[in-house]
Amino acid sequence: MKKKQVSLKDIAKEVGVSIATVSYVLSKGKDSRVSEAMSKKIREVAKRLNYQPNIIAQSLKSGTTNTIGLILADISNPFFANLARVIEDEAAKFNYTVIFGSSDEKADRSKQLVDFLSSRQVDGFIIAPCEGSEEQVRTLLQQNIPVVLIDRFFPKIPTDYVIIDNYESSYRVVEQLVRSGHQRIGMLAYTNRLFHMQERIRGYKTVLRDNGLTVEQERLGEISFADGKKETEEAIDIMLAADQPIDSIFFATNTLAIYGLKHLGKLNLKVPDDIAVVSFDEGEAFDFYYCPLTHVRQPLEEMGKAAVQSLSNRIKNPSTPQQAICLSAEVVVRKSSSVTIAK
């Protein structure tokens, strides 16, 4: 049988004061204007009886729940897991509790999370949107629910967002391969129309053209999220079996890089002796790889903090102008992009 929850009435009865007095003490603290002796007695009784405030009632009264809904693309990905931790820590500074879930890059799963969190009356959302979730974002905006997009955004939807310059970062990391003398550069990216992924592909193609290299469609492998491992292996096999096999490869995400590096190992290809490698994002698994990887390091802490601060501003002042934040990422150059033998 469920134990009856202790109420303000129970505390008032035991102390011998009115319910209003108990309410003032527990909700206003030192500003309650109740004597310190009586306030201390009320707090002691509340603690002994294990009184828990009725959060639902409080939220109905204040119009807020002090909760944030966080929807990420794939919480198993170290990038999103670390980003979630930064957001959670930063939100605590603003007295927000974070409730988060993973869309698994599926629009229907994302909608389920949006609906669930909306029903819990979260004060706002931080979302790394997946492909096909544009209407979900529009609906939240139409309902005047504060939204900040992170890592990805929809250029045609006027939302607050925190991103990095994916085009510039992609250009710079592939440029490291060109500078090292590589000319037959392959790329593996996810096959979706999200702006950030298209910008990474655009950066790859542009740096090749700028350096007089041919952009071969056969060297661009677009991988589905659902069957990433298998398709990554197949794409690499095709690129290596071509009349002019690739001498280097750019992985558009850390997950694709891990799939690819494992497959290169099965093929007994050494990095960078047989093939050079660069990656967008880093991962803890890279620390255990025998060859330090050249990669794009995104400013996770800055992104997470900026997203929480932006959302807090939007919650407090719904009429504030759109906050569009684009941060710079760092290209970390290591051994994997170098040339050790003649190609």
Image: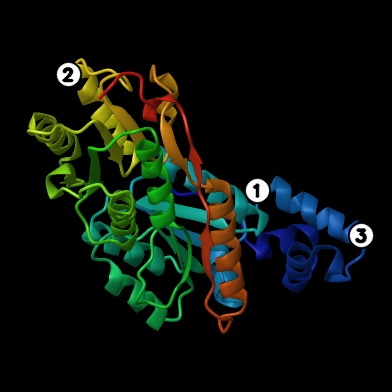
Residue at left offset 28%, top offset 66%: 133
Q: Is mark 1 on a helix, strand or loop?
A: loop
Q: Mark 1 points at which residue?
A: 50
In the rendered image, residue 57, in percent from the top left (x then y), is placed at 56, 70
Mark 1 or mark 2: whose residue is earlier in sequence: 1
Label 3 Cα crowd, 10 Å radius (few <14 / some 14-19 / many 20+):
few
* Pair 2/3: label in front: 2
Spatial CA distance of label 1 from label 2 is 63 Å
- Residue 4 horizontal/vertical position (percent): 53, 54
What amino acid does circle 2 point to? Leu
Which numbered tag is attached to residue 36? 3
The residue under the point 29% across, 71% down is 134
Q: Residue type at mark 1: give it.
A: Asn
Identify which residue is drawn at 16% across, 33% down.
236
Mark 1 and mark 3: Cα distance apart in space? 21 Å
> Badge 2, how many Cα within 10 Å: few under 14, some, many 20+?
few
**Quick check: 216 above or below 236?**
below
Q: Considering depth in this image, is 118 or 278 the residue closer to the camera?
A: 278
- Quarter of the image that includes the C terminus: top left
Percent position of residue 99, x then y:
46, 54
Q: Which of marks 2 and 3 is nearer the N terminus?
A: 3
- Residue at 51% x, 54% y is 98
Comparing 130 with 261, the one in front is 261
Residue 94 drawn at (x, y percent): 65, 59
Kindly identify the amino acid type of the residue bearing the numbered disc 3: Glu
* Numbered mark located on residue 223 in the image: none
Which residue lies under the disc numbered 2? Answer: 267
- Distance between the Cα atoms at labels 2 and 3? 75 Å
* Quarter occupied by residue 75: top left
Residue 7 vertical placement versus 293 (above, below): below
Q: Which of 74 and 192 is in front in this view?
A: 192
Q: What element carries label 2?
A: loop
